[in-house]
Image (cartoon, rainbow, N blue to C red):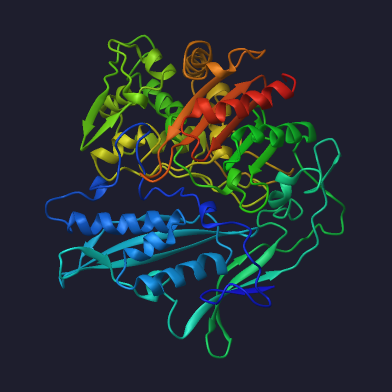
Amino acid sequence: MSSYVDFPHTGPGRRRPRRTAKAFTAVAVVAAVAAGGAYATGLGPFGGEDGPDPEAVAEARAFLADWSAGRLPEAAARTTGPDRAEEVLQGFTAGLDIEEPELTAGTPKDTGDGTVTVPFTARMPVTGLGVWTYDSKLPLRQADDGAWKVEWKLSLVHPRLSDTEKFRLEREETAPVEATDRDGETLSGTTHPSLAPVLAQLAGGTDGGGARGTVQLVDRATGKVERTEASFGGDDTLKDEGPVRTTLDADWQAAAERALGEADGKNASLVALRIDDGEILAVANSPATGFNRAVSGTYAPGSTWKIVTSAALLLKGAVAPDDVVDCPQYLTVGKRFQNVETSEHPGATFRKDFTESCNTAFISLRGKLGDGELGEVAKKHFGVGQTWHVGVPSYDGSVPVPRDATEKAASMIGQGRVQANPLIMASVTATAVSGTFRQPSLVDGTDDETTTAPLPPEVVAQLRTLMRATVTEGTARVLAGLPGDIGAKTGTAEVSDEQDNNGWLVAHRGNVAVACVVEEGVTGGGSAGPVIASLLSAVPES
């Protein structure tokens, strides 16, 4: 099956997308804002008196934010060719079945000829296949009225898109992969609709997935293939050896899919996994078809990331739970950060800061960690940013070294350029409460190339205590009435000024860790909380 970029959206051979522009929910960091705080559009990491004009940089970031969010008319309006820009952007994303693009701005350059160039990295999830990653750049020029505009040209969308060459998506139709759960019960997209994109990616337990396809660069006039830009999937080597046995649990999977009904129709995803071995029990997405955002999505984890930040602080003895770490309404680090609903807790202990998710208190401790230390702890102890072999294509997280003080402040609370997804945050939770990272897996026999070190027992005990207190007396009280010794952490992550916050909640009970994100859920406790409560109410403690 083929589909083309920059073509009309009807006609033979064209698969009509099953979504509207609204479904392109932004998960990019280009306009990230601290949870309840102020890492908003503006100078951010690009500030500097001697650098490019801040207004040009802000316009570039706004263009990328609009594009990633599916606000294509608004993105096009920021260019020197609005009509053509909107046509091409729509053709590129819809024509190549791209869902939820992530566009991350790099360091801008003043070219000296009146033009500012902002490079960016594009991660384009191609529905049912995988993620196409490439680099491009935005040229910006100042108009006669002094306003900065993105200078429209095809090559800014992709360096090889031109008047003579375009892209074509080729899908190889494959039979659905037969799969069973951990007990041998048959799994299918019919009985478990949310598994449809997951099962489509299985190929005998190997990364790459059963679905196969390519993005090709072709000559506009002749259709001749000039080169293959991206390939997805691999050989289904175990095709004749029977169903793929997964680590999933049919009961957990069914409960997870029902639980996402609590998300009120919003895009949401959930992962549940075993703490002692990393085996995945449930992967659920809403909507059920399309992009596997639970495993391959890229989100700012918001305050759920304070688990990792706390681990980093506790590891070096920089803070103790009973230490007083004041929680003011606001704290300015290049930009003004604030707490949810501008709350404050004068004279709070670090324990109180954790249970109430105080942004300003955590940011005030940024000097206790080296610039790259948070990322080092995430990688060394939690496996975040290493290469995982889950059994299907996955995004394994990113914690870059902050580029300035504002970005470092944002990273302390899971914003800035920190990126994760429910799979990563379920694993982070499991590591925090067990002390040992175990690579998540969806099928038996996956390779494990990670190298990690265990957390000290005293740090694990402190993290467990803090997470339990968050349920009994903090922002995760929505889980307080459930049976079992539950620990949790909520999170609220802003994406852009035009969208409501994403809501997060991670939790553990018995041998299971779970994580859920609800896009535009406003708060973690109010949106992801009912989802996790529904799930844990439906399955026995294990």
> Would you identify the image quadrant in which residue 154 lies?
bottom left
Residue located 62% across and 70% down the image = 214
Does any portion of residue 280 appear in the rendered image?
no
Residue located 29% across and 18% down the image = 327
Front residue (pair 504, 224):
504
> Would you identify the image quadrant in which residue 402 lies?
top left
Q: Position of residue 368 (x, y in %)?
A: 28, 26
Front residue (pair 120, 93):
93
Would you place residue 512 above or below residue 133 in this image?
above
Q: Position of residue 175 (x, y in %)?
A: 81, 62
Would you place residue 215 above or below residue 226 in this image?
above
Q: Position of residue 416 (x, y in %)?
A: 35, 42
> Would you identify the image quadrant in which residue 390 lies?
top right
Residue 236 appears left or right of 46: right
Assign the C terminus to one quadrant of the image.
Answer: top right
Residue located 31% across and 30% down the image = 369
Residue 461 appears left or right of 51: right
Assign the N terminus to one quadrant of the image.
Answer: bottom right
Does any portion of residue 271 appear in the rendered image?
yes
Q: How many marks?
A: 0
Would you place residue 212 above or below residue 525 in this image?
below
Q: Position of residue 141 (x, y in %)?
A: 22, 69
Residue farthest along the left direction in this orientation:
49
